[in-house]
């Protein structure tokens, strides 16, 4: 059992949100430990390709960004959380760069793309491995500090004790218990497990099984919109090695369009995620879809319309993966179909990222409200950083109070 006196902030999860919280808490003077189900490197955030939003363009502003979020959420997002997210986006980008994350630039500024549901170009990228770059920078910052890593610690229970909380874990050796003044829950959603139940594909890491949410609910935490799971409109459908891969939505930002079996455009390819996914489902349901070689439903994503120069800078990983499978997306269209991707809802939090349980904070995909019932692309990594920083700093303050 870890010494309770040594831990101010216990972070559950090692994705972008958990790492941001751990770095932030450590820099606020707290003694931090990060518990992760397997290893520090295993997380969903590292798989995020598309980018991170921030209103940095001359024609953009945090207010316009907020309007896009609320509209894409169909007026279900928590306006207080949206205001925090958009108003702190620029400082979050600057903070990430301080950690060593270098975003793609051109013409003396950031290379910005427009993403689905957005009215301005505000998506920053590191090629098409943005999540990997962000988590790597944050992980190295955390490892350079004095924080402790509790690897192969799967949370099984959370209960209040005098002066804080006790977390119980299953470990390779059996069991461990850790007491801490405050806890930050940052272990993501449940879409990998949900996809298995539904017999569907998922973009998620196998660790995304959602038990932390249930543990928090059992401890008395409140939640919202837990039924609102999101499909990524462009899951890879063929070849088989690409099934479950999330084709970057920036393919559509750089000119790719969705086509039915007759080669006709049937939706706004830069619409919100739920609208585009529903359009694909409906088109296939109406008999205008395409069938993969193994009998799965699909439509075409005409990636041949992307300028090669854009693809080489912003989509290099996608090109390598498809070309490795014998298909060049710049020479022929690719097959796509929506794939289970993100838990929109989650634990209810306030603007400090504190849940309805005093001393328990939540950030990233496990927290609800910021996106309402439908998330725009590029806002998940932003939420991880903005609310991860807030959760870590707030937990540190409370632990030392």
Image (cartoon, rainbow, N blue to C red):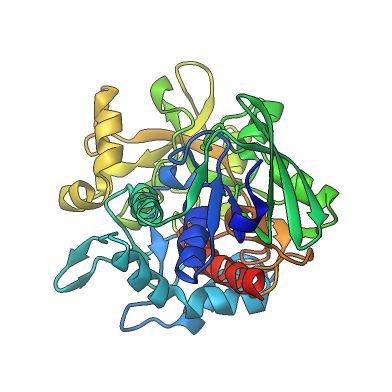
Q: Looking at the figure, which quarter contains the C terminus?
A: bottom right
Name the image quarter holding the N terminus.
top right
Q: What residue do we see at 17% from left, 47% from top?
A: 308
Figure check: 148 above or below 51: above
Q: Is residue 380 visible?
A: no
In this rendering, position of residue 397 left or right of residue 102: right
The total number of labels drawn is 0
Residue visible at 55% across and 71% down in the picture: 393
Nearest to the observer: residue 4 or residue 53: 4
Residue 12 location (% of width, % of height): 60, 49
Q: Residue at x 54, y 57 (%)?
A: 32
In the image, residue 170 lies at what x, y percent? Answer: 68, 31
Where is residue 318, by image quadrant?
Answer: top left
Residue at image position (56%, 31%) is 206
Q: Is residue 140 visible?
A: yes
The quarter of the displayed image where residue 153 is located: top right
Residue 346 horizontal/vertical position (percent):
70, 55
Which one is nearer the viewer's eye here, 58 or 172? 172
x and y percent of residue 249 in the render? 41, 50
The one of 386 and 282 positioned closer to us in this rendering:
386
């Amino acid at each position: 059992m870890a010494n309770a006196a040594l831990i101010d902030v216990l972070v559950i999860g090692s994705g972008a949100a958990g790492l941001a919280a751990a770095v932030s808490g450590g820099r606020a003077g707290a003694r931090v430990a990060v518990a992760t189900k397997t290893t520090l490197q295993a997380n969903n955030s590292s798989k995020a390709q598309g980018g991170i939003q921030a209103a940095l363009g001359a024609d953009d502003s945090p207010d316009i960004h907020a309007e896009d979020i609320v509209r894409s959420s169909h007026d279900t997002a928590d306006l207080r959380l949206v205001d925090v997210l958009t108003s702190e986006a620029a400082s979050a980008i600057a903070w990430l760069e301080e950690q060593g994350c270098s975003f793609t630039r051109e013409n003396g500024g950031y290379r910005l793309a427009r993403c689905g549901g957005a009215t301005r170009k505000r998506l920053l990228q590191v090629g098409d491995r943005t999540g990997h770059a962000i988590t790597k920078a944050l992980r190295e910052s955390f490892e350079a500090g004095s924080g402790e890593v509790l690897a192969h610690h799967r949370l099984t229970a959370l209960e209040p004790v005098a002066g804080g909380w006790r977390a119980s874990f299953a470990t390779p050796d059996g069991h461990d218990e850790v007491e801490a003044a405050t806890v930050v829950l940052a272990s993501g959603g449940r879409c990998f497990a949900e996809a298995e139940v539904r017999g569907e594909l998922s973009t998620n890491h196998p660790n995304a099984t959602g038990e932390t949410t249930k543990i928090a609910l059992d401890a008395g935490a409140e939640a919202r919109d837990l039924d609102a799971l999101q499909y990524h409109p462009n899951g890879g459908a063929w070849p088989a090695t690409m099934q479950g891969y999330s084709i970057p939505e920036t393919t559509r930002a750089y000119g790719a369009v969705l086509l039915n079996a007759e080669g006709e455009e049937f939706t706004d390819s830069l619409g919100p995620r739920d609208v585009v996914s529903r359009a694909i489902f409906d088109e296939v349901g109406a008999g205008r879809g395409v069938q993969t070689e193994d009998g799965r439903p699909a439509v075409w994503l005409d990636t041949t319309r992307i300028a090669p120069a854009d693809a080489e800078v912003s989509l290099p990983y996608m090109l390598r993966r498809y070309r490795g499978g014998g298909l060049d997306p710049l020479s022929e269209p690719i097959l796509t179909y929506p794939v289970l991707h993100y838990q929109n809802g989650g634990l209810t939090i306030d603007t400090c990222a504190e849940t309805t349980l005093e001393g328990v904070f939540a950030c990233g995909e496990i927290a609800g409200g910021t996106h309402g019932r439908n998330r725009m692309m590029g806002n998940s990594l932003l939420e991880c950083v903005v609310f991860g920083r807030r959760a870590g700093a707030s937990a540190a303050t409370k632990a030392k109070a």
